[in-house]
Image: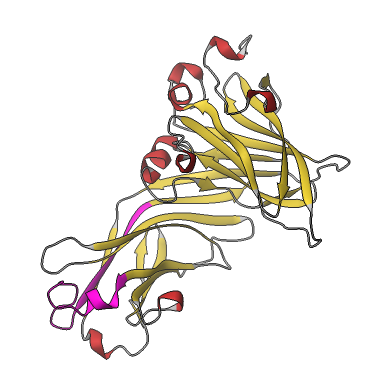
Amino acid sequence: MASSLGDRYSFKVDDASNIMRSVREEKPAHYLMEIESFTEFKDSIEGEDKDYLESMEFVTAGHTWVLVIYPHGNTNIGEEDHISLYLKLISKPSRIGWTVNAIIKFFIFDYEGSNSGPNAHTYDATRMTNGISQALLLRDFIRPSNGFISRTDMCKFGVEVCLPDITPNSTGRLSCLNARTRDNFTWKIKKFSRITYSKCSDYFDMEKRTWELKIYPHGWGAGKGESLTLFLSLIDLSNLTRGKKLYVHTTMRIINQLGEEHEEASICCWYTKEDYSFGAIHLLSLSDLHNKDKGFKMDDQVIVEVEFKLVMLVHEV
């Protein structure tokens, strides 16, 4: 184990008075996430609107939480060169004026020990997420000699939560099985104007799973009467048993048949046995869809496509 944190890498924090750094051998007691291929995960979400990963929900200290990881840093606050780690409170106490005071330890595993940073935070109705925007310089994290990423490109993040006078009694661990892909499915929809409400594609197989596209020519939900809506549904749910979910990053697009720029939306979401259909509510405005000069509908045909960029099966072990 390194004798001090500064021997091999540097730390830089927003509020040094509120954060302590240490090294220990014990694994985090409450939650551990393994990402099997960090490079593929990092590259797949770079520049996306959702440039972070939320873990599965876990319960400890009487509350429900998720661990949030920004591999490129929290760009919402201008952070670009650090790993950012946050803990998000999901459950909300029913009483008015509630607060949850928590001491949080974030962990970045290296193969000589685990680096932890305990810090105190207050959660309330106006602030449900807390953490460290500058947990570790990205260049230090990816440097092979520092040991944060294994030779097989695996890395691990963890968290512990301590509330005063409450003993945590829940343990969770994640194993992320990463499958990088660039597979596309194209659906040519003829006689488009005859669709009164919605239409489903045939089932198709991608990444050893069965899917279905569903299109709403007149929009759905908030997009009704304004935009074309497209959903991707996971049909085969047999592998999504209790404690498992599928992280899917796709690009949905409507093809411009004049060879000009397509209209597309990037979708990042978690599929579970209960929530198995996600999509783009405002994929294309109806005015652009029906404008012949735009080229999205030609000879009463519309062509849509879904591109699978990243699929990760996440489960407790």
Q: Is residue 292 magenta?
A: yes
Q: Which residues make up the magenta segment?
A: 284-309
From the image, which quarter does the C terminus lie in?
top right
Q: Residue at x 47, y 37 (%)?
A: 71
Q: Nearer the viewer, residue 221 or 2?
A: 221
Q: Is residue 18 above or below residue 47?
A: above
Q: Position of residue 67 (x, y in %)?
A: 61, 44
Q: Position of residue 117 (x, y in %)?
A: 66, 27
Q: Position of residue 182 (x, y in %)?
A: 30, 51
From the image, which quarter does the N terminus lie in?
top right
Q: Is residue 246 magenta?
A: no
Q: Is residue 122 left or right of residue 260?
A: right
Q: Residue at x 53, y 35 (%)?
A: 84
Q: Is residue 21 above or below residue 62?
A: above
Q: Is residue 240 above or below residue 123?
A: below
Q: Residue at x 15, y 72 (%)?
A: 295
Q: Position of residue 228 (x, y in %)?
A: 33, 75
Q: Is residue 159 left or right of residue 145?
A: right
Q: Residue at x 79, y 62 (%)?
A: 94
Q: Is residue 217 left or right of residue 130?
A: left
Coloring applied to the structure: secondary structure
